[in-house]
Image (tube, grey):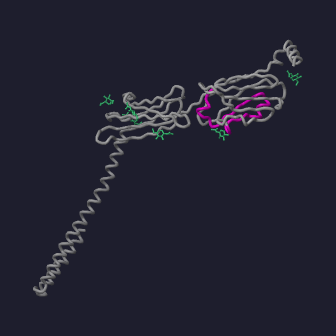
Amino acid sequence: MFQILTILLLETQFSMVLVLFTVEVPQQLYIAEYGSNVTMECRFTVNGSVDLGLLTVFWEQKRQGSLKPKEVYAFRNGKALCPSQHPDYIGRASLLHSELMLGRAILQITDVKITDAGSYLCLIDYQGVDYKYIALKVRASYKTINTQVMRIPGEDKLVFMCQSEGFPLAEVFWQNENFNLSGSANTTYTLTADGLYNVTSILTFKPNTSENYTCVFWNKELNGETSAHFSTLALISTQYTGQKFLISLIIPTCVTVAVLLSALIIFQKRKSFKNEQHEKGDDFNSQTEALYLSTVTASRDSGSVDL
Ligand SMILES: *[C@@H]1O[C@H](CO)[C@@H](O)[C@H](O)[C@H]1NC(C)=O
Ligand SMILES: *[C@@H]1O[C@H](CO)[C@@H](O)[C@H](O)[C@H]1NC(C)=O
Ligand SMILES: *[C@@H]1O[C@H](CO)[C@@H](O)[C@H](O)[C@H]1NC(C)=O
Ligand SMILES: *[C@@H]1O[C@H](CO)[C@@H](O)[C@H](O)[C@H]1NC(C)=O
Ligand SMILES: *[C@@H]1O[C@H](CO)[C@@H](O)[C@H](O)[C@H]1NC(C)=O
Ligand SMILES: *[C@@H]1O[C@H](CO)[C@@H](O)[C@H](O)[C@H]1NC(C)=O
């Protein structure tokens, strides 16, 4: 031990570079999209080819505000050490082994979760020990906005609803061509099991001259904003086509019913007429009976023309 130290000290005097084992990070902060894959890199000093049997790489994560770090990945003597890995990272964390030969300890995390955000320690032991920290931020953009339109029965008010999930928490703004309507909106949120914010914003208003309404999800940390548009014009035309549809259904129905009713009335009249005739038939002579029959036939013909 003392011998090695003496040698190292002697070597130091000749060349600092040869003896100093260091770990460096080309990038200190990574920002990953929720559900994507991220790779974070630490570089360590190598002299020629790397003997993996002598190498130890250790990655550990600590969330902001939590005391206990989680083991993300451990590599010792050429092998991954699985038993001590934190359950959160099982099957999602790996070290790109081929890169180790080049002095690069690259940690890959797949299907990034909100809880993966935090501070990562990479500690490397290769004939010397050193470590560095890397920060990981996770974002989830409010990609799809679900919309819903309701009409308050009895009042001439409309209700627009926008709902989306993301991280970090977004503000929701409402506007039409002329006004910022955010003041009259009610925005609430819940947390999903995955740690995303489930944001719902409801705007209740009396439609007036404005046609176009927009809800905007905005957060300064997220790149860009997402928005959804409503048009009251479309609503009115939807209502109109709805009425047209009703009319096209009602008119033929009324006509059919009227025709059937009149046919039924005519039929009933004739039936009672026939019965009367039959009862009184004995009293009439055959000549008058023939006359009646011809009248009935004639009116029956005209009836069929009406139909
Ligand atoms: C670096 O490698 C060369 C040859 O491979 C060797 O002579 C030298 O001692 C090595 N230096 C250190 C500090 O390991
Ligand atoms: C993430 O990595 C996994 C495994 O390497 C791969 O199957 C998947 O397609 C990758 N996902 C993305 C979004 O690149
Ligand atoms: C906003 O909505 C929530 C739930 O829908 C409700 O509890 C709350 O009273 C509403 N706030 C206002 C100011 O309307
Ligand atoms: C988000 O909240 C809405 C109601 O506000 C609910 O219908 C929806 O299922 C929630 N989504 C998730 C992923 O929790
Ligand atoms: C339309 O509505 C906005 C906000 O609700 C209101 O400030 C404005 O005066 C209204 N305009 C008309 C012409 O009614
Ligand atoms: C509403 O938006 C549509 C399409 O985006 C546009 O054609 C129309 O002129 C807008 N209406 C007003 C009043 O600005």
Report the number of discs: 0
Residue 287 sits above or below residue 79 on the image: below
Of the 4 image quadrants, the one containing the C terminus is: bottom left
Which residue is found at the position 38% from the left and 29% from the top?
181
Of the 4 image quadrants, the one containing the N terminus is: top right
Left or right, 286 with reference to 95: left
Left or right, 20 with reference to 227: right
Residue 122 sits above or below residue 290 on the image: above
Q: Which of 262 and 128 is in front in this view?
A: 128
Q: Which of 65 and 147 is in front in this view?
A: 65
Which residues lie in the magenta part?
90-118
Residue 302 sits above or below residue 154 on the image: below
Left or right, 141 with reference to 159: right
Is 106 within the magenta? yes
Which residue is found at the position 26% from the left and 61% from the top?
255
Q: Where is residue 86 in the image (x, y as percent from the top left)?
A: 67, 34
Q: Position of residue 271 (x, y in %)?
A: 19, 76
Q: Where is residue 13 in the image (x, y as percent from the top left)?
A: 85, 12
In which quadrant of this rendering is ligand 5 seen? top left
User: Can residue 72 be seen in this snapshot?
Assistant: yes
User: Can residue 176 be seen in this snapshot?
Assistant: no
Is 195 within the magenta? no
Residue that lies at the very extreme toward the top in this rendered image? 13
Q: Quadrant of residue 261 in the image? A: bottom left
Which residue is found at the position 57% from the left and 31% from the top?
139
Q: Position of residue 126 (x, y in %)?
A: 80, 25
Left or right, 28 with reference to 197: right
Q: Nearer the viewer, residue 142 or 79?
A: 79
Q: Quadrant of residue 228 in the image? A: top left
